[in-house]
């Protein structure tokens, strides 16, 4: 899995929300989110890989752009990918009323087809993605166990007339 595939999976998981994730010193959005951010915020679009648009901005500009999206009441989610720990975390979520309704995944693919380079890398993004989902499933399981325990206690109280 590549970084772009991880982002595409995160987009699928968070439909309608704008998904941003850091890659080194930049936060990046791809596909529909990139096209949307280009139109909405004027961010420059470039090619991430063949037929996949991306936009990005520096780590320092995160607050600036997320504040604009909050003001416009858009839903978004920001992930932090820690390369050293091979860990993916949600660091900022905004449940705005407006969703990303962009249908276009790319803008000018003629440029992409003639300028992209492909790189083979270790699949650390897949590992981080799996670990994030494992942690979220553990949290969900614990919450369900708590609810079940409360129900059992309630039934016992009812049995004893308390």
Image (spheres, rainbow, N blue to C red):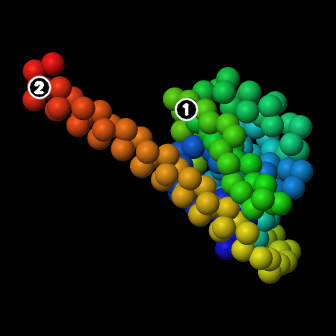
The answer to whether 154 appears left or right of 72 in the picture is: left
Q: What mark, if any, has residue 160 been given in the picture?
A: 2
Label 2 – label 1 distance at C-alpha: 44 Å
Q: Toward the viewer: 102 or 159?
A: 159
Residue 143: in sight, yes or no? Answer: yes
Q: Quadrant of the N terminus?
A: bottom right
Q: Which residue is mark 1?
A: 95
Crowdedness of circle 2 by 10 Å Cα count: few (<14), some, many (20+)? few
In the rendered image, the vertical position of residue 81 relative to residue 120, given as above or below: above
Direction from residue 155 to residue 40 in the image, left or right = right
Structural crowding at the residue carrying mark 1, measured as other residues with C-alpha within 10 Å and reported as few (<14), some (14–19) or many (≥20): few
Indicate which disc, 2 or 1, sits on the residue closer to the N terminus: 1
- Judging depth in this view, the residue of 13 and 123 nearest the camera is 123
Please tell me which residue is depicted at 43% across the width and 45% down the height of the picture: 142
Question: Residue 41 appears at what percent x and percent y?
Answer: 76, 37
* Quadrant of the rendered image containing residue 87: bottom right
x, y percent for residue 32: 63, 54
State the image coordinates of residue 8 (x, y, percent, origin top left). Answer: 62, 61
Q: Secondary structure at mark 2?
A: loop
Q: Secondary structure at mark 1?
A: loop
In the displayed structure, does residue 47 sit left or right of residue 158? right
Report x, y in % for residue 85: 78, 59
Q: Nearer the viewer, residue 148 or 55?
A: 148
Does 93 sit above or below residue 88? above
Q: Which residue is located at x 17 percent, y 32 percent?
A: 156
In the displayed orientation, state which residue is furthest to the top. Answer: 162
Residue 117 marker: none
The residue mark sitting in front, 2 or 1, is 2
Question: Could you say which quadrant of the image residue 49 lies in?
Answer: bottom right
Is residue 15 visible in the rendered structure shown here? no
Q: Could you tell me which residue is drawn at 74 percent across and 49 percent down? A: 80
């Amino acid at each position: 899995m590549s970084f772009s595939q991880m982002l595409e999976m995160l987009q699928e998981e968070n439909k309608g929300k704008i998904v941003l994730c850091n890659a080194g010193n930049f936060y990046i959005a791809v596909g529909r989110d990139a096209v949307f951010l280009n139109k909405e915020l004027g961010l420059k679009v470039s090619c991430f890989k063949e037929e996949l648009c991306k936009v990005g901005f520096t780590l320092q500009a995160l607050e600036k752009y997320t504040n604009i999206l909050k003001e416009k009441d858009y839903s978004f989610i920001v992930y932090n990918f820690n390369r050293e720990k091979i860990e993916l975390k949600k660091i900022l979520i905004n449940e705005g009323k407006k969703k990303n309704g962009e249908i276009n995944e790319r803008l000018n693919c003629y440029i992409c087809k003639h300028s992209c380079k492909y790189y083979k890398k270790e699949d650390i993004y897949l590992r981080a993605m799996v670990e994030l989902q494992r942690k979220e499933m553990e949290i969900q399981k614990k919450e369900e166990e708590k609810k079940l325990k409360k129900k059992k206690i309630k039934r016992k109280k009812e049995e004893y007339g308390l």
